[in-house]
Image: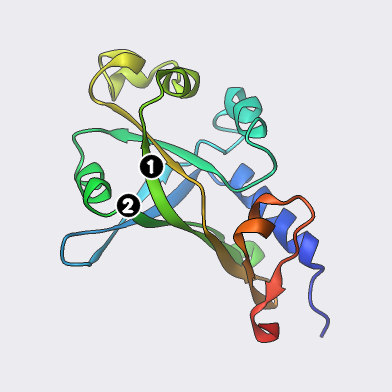
Amino acid sequence: MTQPNPIDVRQTFLSLMAATPVCYVTTLDADGLPHTTAMNNLRCVKEYPNLADFHAGHGNNFTLFLTTGVQSDKITRIRANPRASVYFCDPDRIVGFMLGGEIEIVNDQRIKNRIWQKGWTMYYPNGPEGPEYGVLKLVPKIVKGWCRTGSFELTPKQAGDRHGEAVPEQQR
């Protein structure tokens, strides 16, 4: 059986990010135990079409922004240990991948304003400048997953490089 084209694997992962409305974020507590939470995927074009240009401005890479309440346990865990992962999957297509790295709590008000969506006052009553509205950013150090017939990993350079190739695990 032939392996998928490595560039196709990268594009498959990026397409999944653009199509999946929910992703799964895992953070670590003080004891090192994982906590996984389903979160809205702001890169989902169908759900957030007005953010497509924002994400395109970050290049053709896997940088991910998420929103959450500043008072959440998740923020407490991230402040104590920013190491985290985000998982995307489509079981019907037999594809899934994980972004791993350190999550940053975004303080840049311009970014927070740009990401803000109409109707979010039900979650963040004071709007984009309110103290309860938080934005997270993950620039992954690793992109690793499964695509149809094999597992793949992208190095940091490959994850951000339009011409990077995925390396099948069995070849590493």
Picture quarter with the C terminus: bottom right
Residue furthest toward the left? 31
Crowding at dot 2, Cα within 10 Å, few <14 / some 14-19 / many 20+, comes out as some
Q: Position of residue 33 (x, y in %)?
A: 22, 67
Which residue is most to the front? 157
Residue at image position (75%, 64%) is 165
Residue 91 seen in the figure: no
Q: Residue at x 51, y 47 (%)?
A: 139
Look at the image and tell me whether residue 81 can be seen.
yes
- Of 157 and 76, the residue lying toward us: 157
Q: Which residue is mark 2?
A: 82
Q: Dots 1 and 2: beta carbons under 8 Å? A: yes
Give x and y (percent) for residue 108: 41, 24
**Residue 36 placed where, x, y %?**
32, 57
Q: Residues within 10 Å of mark 1 (few under 14, many from 20)?
A: some
Q: Relative to residue 100, is residue 68 drawn left or right? A: left
Name the quadrant of the N terminus: bottom right
SS type, badge 2: loop
Q: Which amino acid is tagged 1?
A: Glu
What amino acid type should be assigned to the residue bearing mark 2?
Answer: Pro
- Camera-side residue: 120 or 54? 54
> Where is mark 1, residue-wise?
104
Q: With respect to residue 45, does 120 lie above or below?
A: above
Q: Quadrant of residue 128?
A: top left
Residue sitting at x 68%, y 38% = 59
Q: CA distance from mark 1 to mark 2?
A: 7 Å
Q: Could you tell which of marks 1 and 2 lies nearer the N-terminus?
A: 2
Q: Residue at x 79, y 61 (%)?
A: 7
Q: Nearer the viewer, residue 56 or 121?
A: 56
Say left or right for 56 vs 136.
Answer: right
